[in-house]
Amino acid sequence: MPIIQCHPGDCNRVAIDDIERPVIAVGASRTNGSWEKAMHCHRKAQLIYTLEGIISCELEQGVWVVPPQCAVWIPSGLMHSARGTGVNQCYSLFVEPDANLSLPTSCCTLSVTPLLRELLLHAAHFPLLYDEQGPEGKIINVLLDQLTVAEVEDLYLPLPRDNRLRQLTDGMLQDPADKSTLAEWAGRIGMSERSLSRTFVNQVGVSVHRWRKQLHVILALQKLSGGASVQTVALDLGYESASSFVTMFRKAQGKPPARYLSDCANSPDLPIRGFSLSENMA
């Protein structure tokens, strides 16, 4: 049975929601270059898993980044957009909301074990209307069981609710190399520096400085996966040297960027250490 394929940015949500099966696996269209899927939603929850390249998903409350051998889980009915960079090879799993009540109820990044990976790749060869009571249905049940115990990673960038603070985060997303001080940002968005800092921590859970470090990790993963050099990424993100950027990345991910991506791509059974917002970063 040939694999069910679609371009990662073009899966037909209407057709997927209309297929009368609890779980549908789709993949793996290999693309070279960036792609983007605008804000949309579907009744079925979605798992997006990437073998190659970096995928990011944005919801109202934040941005999730998906390095190779990880996946992002998007619960039913949530508006979201998706974007891929570099050479992308990814799979999608669409799951009815009542297929397994133990699945995550909020968006998250999941580490994919070798067993879950093989089950997902195998399920992508099933016919759309597979026999739910036969061997294929049993494999789907095992796949769902493995999905419920997948480890949640911390590759997540929370966004504030306050519209003024969203001006700040949007500005940093558009120009991550901007080195404006908090006082300068406060003046631009009409807040005092103290109020900006306090409100940001209350809504996001971390300081602006720590949030910016997380943003740099996410953007670095996207740029490096697309083929950019460490030197180029360091300059694009406003670092004075490649070594200062590598030091920041090593503190966040436990290893330098080149080794991190190499390990992700070549060792699917290697645990992926997510960036924790609670870590003590300089």
Image (cartoon, grey):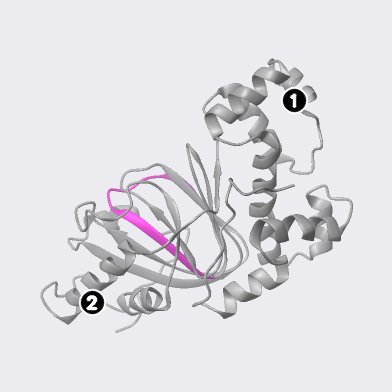
Label 1 CA crowd tier, 10 Å (few <14, some 14–19, many 20+): some
Residue at the disc numbered 2: 139
* Identity of the residue drawn at 63% across and 53% down: 218
The magenta segment is 38-51
Does any portion of residue 129 appear in the rendered image?
yes
61 with respect to 273 (left or right): left
User: Regarding mark 2 in the picture, which secondary structure is present there?
Assistant: helix
Q: Position of residue 82 (x, y in %)?
A: 50, 52
Mark 1 = which residue?
185
Residue located farthest toward the left when viewing the structure as drawn? 133
Q: Quick one: which residue is furthest to the right in this view? A: 240
Judged from the image, the secondary structure of the residue bearing numbered disc 1 is helix
Q: Which residue, as the protein is rendered here, is positioned at the far bottom? A: 1
Majority SS type along the magenta span? strand
Indicate which disc, 2 or 1, sits on the residue closer to the N terminus: 2
Name the residue rendered at 84%, 53% in the picture: 235
* Quarter of the view holding residue 88: bottom right
For the N terminus, which image quadrant? bottom left
Answer with left or right where residue 239 lies relative to residue 56: right
Crowdedness of circle 2 by 10 Å Cα count: few (<14), some, many (20+)?
A: some
> Mark 1 belongs to which amino acid?
Trp
In the rendered view, tell whether residue 95 sits above or below residue 183.
Answer: below
Viewer-proximal residue among 44 and 230: 230
